[in-house]
Every structure is written in structure tokens, then in C-alpha cells.
Amino acid sequence: MKIMITPTETSSSPDLQTPDLETSASPARRVYIETLGCQMNQNDSELMLGLLKTVDFQPTDTPEQADFVILNTCQIRENAEDKAYNYLHRLKVLKREKPWLKIAMAGCVAQQAQSTVFDRVPFVDLVLGTQNIHDLPELTRRLFPAPESQDDDPSFFLEAPTAFSSRKMKPGMQLLATDRQRIGSTYDYINDVAPVRQSPFSAWVTIIEGCDYFCTYCVVPYTRGRQRSRKPQSILDEVKRLVDDGVKEVTLLGQTVDAYGKDFTDPELKHWRLQHLFEALNDLPGLARIRFMTSHPLDLSDAIIDAIAHLERVMPYVHIPMQSGDDTVLARMKRGYTSREYFELVDTLFDRVAGVAISGDMIVGFPGETDEQFQRSVAAIYRSNVMAVNTAAYSARAQTPAGLWETRNAHDEAVPDDIKQARLATINHAVNDQALRWSQKFRGQTVDVLVEGPSRRNPSRWMGRTPCNKVVNFEGAPEHDATLSGAAIGGVALTPSVVAPGLIVPVTITDVFAWSLLGRVAAL
Ligand code: SAH
Ligand code: SF4
Ligand code: F3S
């Protein structure tokens, strides 16, 4: 691990007074993590909480209660990055009230901005890159040194942490831990640490990090590094532990999840691909649903499609972004496929995987996108028959090739903001049409729903998801208490009980909206 330590500029700024912790009433060590960005960031935050538990930090629900606040950041678009700095600026006020508070910026902005974070937000104590998560326990020992270690002996960093209250702190230091490229997956370094998860029934499991594609608009290869697959045994062990703890559904995560294994060079691992993980997990008693995201069109092999089609616990739902419906734009994005190839792929999925639903991502206003090219993206939404699409206005990112086009006098290429916004509204209309069209297929049908908990809008109803990931809000029916589909849960017979989170229950759909279905527990 590369750690740079810089002295904190404490005395000159009124915001950064040397804390006197002997008089500060600090509680036990508590950590709060705010997460921006994708599911991989969410999973990383869960892992950070797990790692911090090993050095006696307990998670807390608000930054106000915390001694250590970590902001896990996203850099995918300019507004995501702005959000990160705005959040940190708000924390400055809190640090004024609680001078012992330590603040870390983690995630994709941290990895990319490195030490310039300290220039922009000087009250930040730690900048933690995406490939240094497993160094967190050691870093906290440095950030929160033991009270007796107040000299310059570097060995004090190695002392076990003590209770945070009633200790004096050195004027302070700032730590930068942002290694460029690690060999192997972060998650392989910490096999023995359990992430602290948000749901007891559904878990994200990162299986591949980084990306080798370098699409011209995208920061991910720079913020996450090259593709690194996690060892199969580490994944299988983690999922086994999760299932032992009652988890029913896992979502295997990666920026190109279907490229899993392609980077392995070890002869014992080389043959492992996503379909092999599916096969191993499908045989795990107790696991009801296996999901995976995000797939790249170039990596979704026949063998993976076969596995989705034939393994009953692999859910028929594929998130496979198209990004544009126009071949010239696709080529300039460096996506590596044409619209026709994409359509052939989704047609194959519809032919071979019963009940499959497809979702994707589209960018509008990519540099040089004409109205005609944009209209091809709208048409592609209907043609590919996707159930859902995340849409976004193109945002130039400085470190990417497309970002550089704009700075190199190619401003005429840039699509003006008002046109981007108008295109976004138009494409969202098409996305909404498709969502509703998909919902209508379910009217009157009875579907298996994995119950997540009470519905957010109406807590007297339950909320869960169909195999193809449609949200269902539904009424329970105590008179048919759920002997329901207990047997459907990984073959494990459950004690008959009313509908409860973590159970799979059959629900008859009575009404449909674009983004959710309404139903009632089916009578057996
Ligand atoms: N690995 C996935 C995407 C990961 S990033 C894939 O290859 O499809 C998530 C989404 O953010 C992308 O699918 C894209 O639609 C969007 N995105 C990425 N960079 C962007 C940018 N510079 N401006 C706007 N949207 C962007
Ligand atoms: Fe970004 Fe392209 Fe990699 Fe997806 S495949 S993460 S869009 S570079
Ligand atoms: Fe954002 Fe990083 Fe994910 S840039 S989308 S948090 S990989």
C-alpha cells in the first residue's frame, strides 16, 4: 500500500482547530458511510463497515452520531462528482462542532482526484482509493492513534486502537491511500471479513472489478482499474456463509459481470466463467434466486445464455446496456457492436430464455449526436423490447477520450444542454411506454414474488419482486396464510407462516402501472 502522509494545516484555519479531546465528550467509536453511485459502491461500503467492525467501529445511522464519516463517491457524471464535494462541504460544519470527527473520501472520485482532494476540501483526513479498501483497518490505526502514542515514533501506528473518548490527539495528519493497480480482486484480500449488509435476505456479491473496455465516454477503467476477477472459491464460500445466515437472493456484481474469469491466467482457474459460477450456486441448498449485473453485449456468450435458460435459480433478467441505437455513435463510443448485433442478441435471449426481461442504459447527447441518430436510440428502445432503461444525458469527463474531444476545440460537436434535456424527455417517454407494455403482460397472472418488506408508500401492503425484477406491491391474506410457496425457497420447507420478508409467495396481479404491479396473495 502506498500511503502518503501530509501534515494537516490545522492552526491557520478556524475550521481546523486542534481538537482537545480531553474536554470533548466523544462517544464510543462510530462510523457512518454515505454511499453515492452504483451497486459496486454499495457493496464496497458494506465491506468497509465489515472491515471497520474488526477494529471496533460500530455503524451508526447519521453523520451527527459518528466519529468517522466516510463518503463513498461516484464520478460517472459531473453531477455525481459535484454531489460528492457538496456533501463534504456540509460536513465541514459538523467538524467545527465535533473537532475529533475524522472524514474520509473514498470511491471513484477519490481514486481519480488523489491528493487534489485535500486542496479542494482541506478538512478531509483520508483519501481512500477504490483499490485500497482492505487497508482501512490499518489506516484507521493511523487516523485514530492510541493516546500513549503521541510522539513521533512511527511504531505507534501499529498499536491497537483504544476507546476514542478522553484522549489527546496530535495536530493531525492527512492520509492518501490510492494505489493505481492491484493484482487480484480486493475481495480476495479479505476472505474472512463479512460485509455488513442492508438486507438479511438479499445480498450483493462483487465477483469482478474494473473494466478493460475503455468506452470513450466512461471513467470506470480509470477509477476502478483493469478487470480483476475474484477467485471462484472465495465467491462460493461467501455465498455459502450468506445462505447459512438466511440470505435467499444474491446479485453477482461487476461492470462487465459476464466477462468473469477472462483475466485468469492460473491454469487451475483459467476455465472459470460466469456460467460455472451459476452452476455451482444453483446447487446450493437454500439459495432461491441468483441475479447478476451488468452484462456487456460482447461478453454474453451462448454458454451463459444457456445457463440462464436452464438453471432454475438463475433469474430470467439481464441488464445489458445498449448506450445508443445508432451505429456511427456506437463506433465513436467504442462499444464494439452494431445495433443489429445488439438486436440479434436480445432476440436470442427472448427465444431461449423463458420469461426473460431485458433492461439497459442509454446515453443521449453524445458528442456529435444528430437528431436522426438520436431517433434511432428511441426506435431501439421499442425494437429491443426492453422492460426498463436507465437514461442519462452525456456528461463530458476530463480523463476520457470523448472528454478530451471537447477540450480540443471540438466544441461544435458538443450537444447543447437544452437539446440534451429535450432528448432525455423524449427517450424517457419511450422508456415509460415500454415499462407499461411489460407491466400489462402481468395483468391477471400469478407470479412468484420474493418479499422484501412493507411497501414504502403504503406499509399495510408488502413489496417484493418477480423473477424478472418487476416490483410488486401486494396485499397479504391471513386466511391463506403462507404455506404458500415455502417449498419454492431453495427446496427448504418452511414452517407455515404469514407472508414475511424473505419468503417467496405467489401473488395474483390485479392492476398495473409502468413501474410497479399491484396484487394480492394468491389462494392455493
Ligand atoms: N459497465 C456498464 C456501464 C457502467 S457505467 C456498461 O458497459 O454498460 C453506468 C452507466 O452510466 C453507463 O451504462 C452509461 O449509460 C452511463 N454513463 C457512463 N459514462 C457516462 C457519461 N460520461 N455521461 C453520461 N452517462 C454515462
Ligand atoms: Fe464503462 Fe464501457 Fe467499461 Fe461499461 S464497458 S464500465 S461503459 S468502459
Ligand atoms: Fe460511479 Fe464508480 Fe460505480 S464512477 S457508477 S461508483 S464504478
Image (cartoon, rainbow, N blue to C red):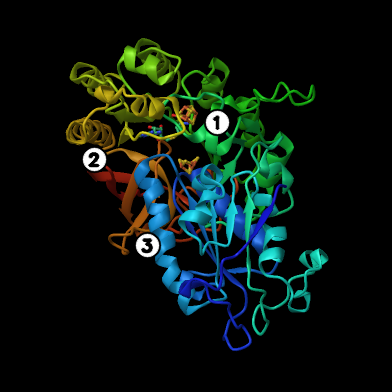
Badge 3 marks a residue whose secondary structure is: helix
Quarter of the image where one finds residue 452: bottom left
**Label 2 environment density (alpha carbons within 10 Å; few <14, some 14–19, many ≥20):** some
Indicate which label's residue lies in the foreground, 1 or 2.
Answer: 1
Say which amino acid is labelled 2.
Answer: Ala
Quarter of the image where one finds residue 281: top right
Name the residue carrying label 2: 514
Q: Is residue 476 above or below residue 416?
A: below
**Closest to the observer, 320 or 214:** 214
Badge 2 marks a residue whose secondary structure is: loop
Label 1 and label 2: CA atoms lie apart by 28 Å
Q: Seen in the image, is 434 located left or right of residue 338?
A: left
**Label 3 environment density (alpha carbons within 10 Å; few <14, some 14–19, many ≥20):** few
Tell me, yes or no, if residue 50 can be seen here: yes
**Closest to the observer, 301 or 161:** 161
Marks 1 and 2 in Cβ contact (< 8 Å):
no
Assess mark 2: CB under 8 A from ligand 1? Answer: no
Q: Seen in the image, is 436 located left or right of residue 135?
A: left
Marks 3 and 2 in Cβ contact (< 8 Å):
no
Name the residue carrying label 1: 257
Assess mark 3: CB under 8 A from ligand 3? Answer: no
Among the two numbered marks 3 and 2 on one chain, the one whose residue lies closer to the N terminus: 3
Name the residue carrying label 3: 478
Taking the spot 45% from the left edge, 59% from the top edge, the residue there is 500
Among the two numbered marks 3 and 1 on one chain, the one whose residue lies closer to the N terminus: 1
Q: Seen in the image, is 443 located left or right of residue 69?
A: left
Say which amino acid is labelled 1.
Answer: Val
Marks 3 and 1 in Cβ contact (< 8 Å):
no
Label 3 and label 2: CA atoms lie apart by 28 Å
**Closest to the observer, 155 or 289:** 155
Q: Is residue 300 above or below residue 474?
A: above
Q: Position of residue 510 (x, y in %)?
A: 24, 45
